[in-house]
Image (cartoon, coloured by chain):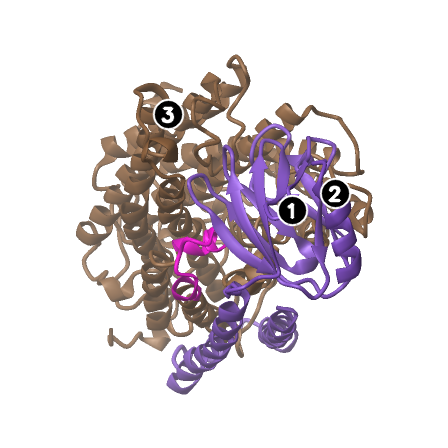
Amino acid sequence: MRGDWAIFILASIVVGVVVYALILAPLVLWRRRSDELPPQFSVNRRVEIFSVAIPLALIAFLFYVTYTSEVSVDAVAAHPFATVDVTGFRWSWRFEYPGAGIRILGTPGRPPELVLAQNETTRIDLRTDDVNHSFWVSDFLFKRDAVPGIVNRFDLTPVRTGTFRGACTQFCGLEHTLMTFTVRVVPLEAYRRWIASHGKAPV
Amino acid sequence: MMRWLTTTDHKKIGIMYMASTFGFFCIGGLLSMIIRAQLSEPGLSLVSPHAYNQIFTLHGTAMIFLFVAPFGIGLANYLIPLQIGAPDMAFPRLNATSLWLFILGGLTVLSGAAAAGGAAASGWSSYAPLSEIAIATGAGQDLWLIGILMTSVSTILTAVNFIVTVFLYRAPGMTMWRMPIFTWEMVATSLLILMAFPPLAACLCMLLIDRHLGGHFFDPASGGSAVLYMHLFWFFGHPEVYVLILPYFGVITEVVSVFSRKPVFGYVGMVLSAFAIAGLSMGVWAHHMFTTGVVDNPFFAGVSFLIAVPTGIKFFNWAGTMWRGAIQLSTPMLFAIGFMLNFLIGGITGVLLASPPIDYEAHDSYFAVAHFHYVIGGGSLFAIFAALFFWFPKFSGIRLDERLGRAFFYTMFVGFNCTFLPMHFMGLEGMPRRVYTYDAVAHLPILNLISTIGAGIMAIGVLLFIANVVISARKRVPAGDDPWGGYTLEWATTSPPPEFNFTKLPPIRSERPVFDLHHPELTAKAGR
């Protein structure tokens, strides 16, 4: 996904610079200096064909980039390393590790922490207890909505250790702002220790 | 006074439309000042969370439903009959009905602020189940739904009126292919309204049925669907974006052409691109739903990308119109340039958001907030001021002060970019939209402070505009019939025009009849 951002931002800058030049150059070159009428042309088929063809080629390329990336981002592994049930509710999150008997419950203003193993694929089954929510971790460049009546499934495979900020991005009422959480990514060994120490007594 | 309240004259109706939308703009603008004040530092509590949610809901509602879209309708009300050489709209009484239904609808929405529990607080998109009776218990939500329903019926009626007027009331010689681009853009807008607003009205009715008559349209526990609400809302909501911009593409095209002293470059391309945008915009609604995981993302991404092509045509044609022209940077032209510079950024970030893997990060973050403000604020709002400065002499017979006008433009341009450019980075640093505060992490505090300062600069700008209108109205510098050397028929009549618009029409042999009149040496070739 970082690759997509790089390609799109590069394309944006190129398009931006070219079009800005097309808009600003006439302001410098062709200001009104007398009452003489400028040439009254209004058609140039070649320019018009180019003004369709070039954007078309550019978006065809961007669509190719999007399509290939989307397929890999949305793919879910058949045999993930772990599964976590994530449930949004007004206004916090519940993280459940069904295999290990761990249940982490946040409250508004006391955000819960999701623990993931580095370089391992964790499947998230995302649900909501009430209205629409959205599970967003900006550092993972990823979000997915929790929609009433639907279980949304996606994989997270974090490669960097550390603690990352997460938030609900789908407005869900009064304390939507407080519906934050953190994600702590730890090496596999530490993850195993964490599971073992928290497995018995739900936090 | 009674003459204005009971009028069916399209010009008076147009002016009342524009004046009332400007009132709603001021309300929406004041609300945004509260938002920016609250967010100027992390951890502030100038307003309560409940008040904040009402404020951003009403801000979005006022700006979209009660200002940018209906201002275009008011402007078109004033201009379309003049531009096609007609005495009035096809259905003048229906036209008056639309105006009053709109004003009443707007006031109904705002009256929610006085209801127990306050105004609607579920965002301008009013997603169910958040807006269902179980959660949005107050009458504010009902007043919002009923008010928006009234404005949408008003909009549909006006669209019918525009289409009939343009198709049947054109002056002799005014063939379709000689119509001003603004009128063409309004035809595309009207068709779009007829396709997009009935689903909105249905959606609002369904929500009212859910709330008060025991319906379960949007309740999955009883066999309804929360996704259905999103589909219905965005099936309206995305075409609505083009209802908010197509009229202003028309404004910019007229302004750029007149102030470059050249005909519109690629007239046919301009017309076809308007219809291409209108057509494509009916097939992109689910790009607002990429992150739900229940729509065909590649399809909607592809169609959304395609809109960049007709939009690109417009940019190239504006540049082509300015190319080798004789450009005069009067206030309307400055705003047109500002429009292009800002709107381009909004257009480019729109392409980014239309790519699902990018949208997964940017969606519903401040990046998206920045994007749509560049489109609607930096785009439509700037075009509105271009239109006001361009046609104010026609509306009133007096000129607005040029020096104050230019100062106003530069203030707005700096203020706008200062407010909204930082929002892109807030989004990428993890700030969701619709939050009343944020943690003091990364660069969020400084970015938000810059944004708030920018909002203050814009507020000063708007005050400069109001001062300009007041001062100019006192000074009364006569504008004459055609202060800018305009091309289209509204410049062939007096300022302000008489009742029924024309005592005498010039011959119409091209899309620039008034230019032909003033330049008989360049006899227009009757080709189209």
User: Residue A198: which numbered mark, if any?
Assistant: 2
The N terminus of chain A, quarter of image: bottom right
Q: Answer yes or no: are tags 1 and 3 on the same subunit.
A: no
Q: Alpha-carbon distance for marks 2 and 1?
A: 8 Å
| First of labels 2, 1 by sequence position | 1
Do the dots labelled 2 and 1 sit on one chain? yes
Kind of residue at disc 3: Ile
Residue beneath label 3, please? B146
| Chain letter, disc 3 residue | B
**Which dot, 3 or 2, sits closer to the camera?**
2
Task: Give the residues in magenta.
Answer: B285-301
Of B310 and B329, nearer the camera is: B310
Task: Determine the colour of chain A.
Answer: purple
Q: What is the quadrant of the C terminus of chain A in the image?
A: top right
Q: Do the residues labelled 2 and 1 touch (CB within 8 Å)?
A: yes
Circle 1 is placed at which residue position? A100
Residue A201, image x and y in percent? 72, 36
Q: Residue A134, image x and y in percent? A: 56, 45
Side of B182 relative to B329 (left or right)? left
Q: Which chain is brown?
A: B
Secondary element at image label 3: helix
Label 1 and label 3: CA atoms lie apart by: 51 Å
Amino acid type assigned to the residue bearing label 2 in the image: His
Query: What amino acid type should be assigned to the residue bearing mark 1?
Result: Ala
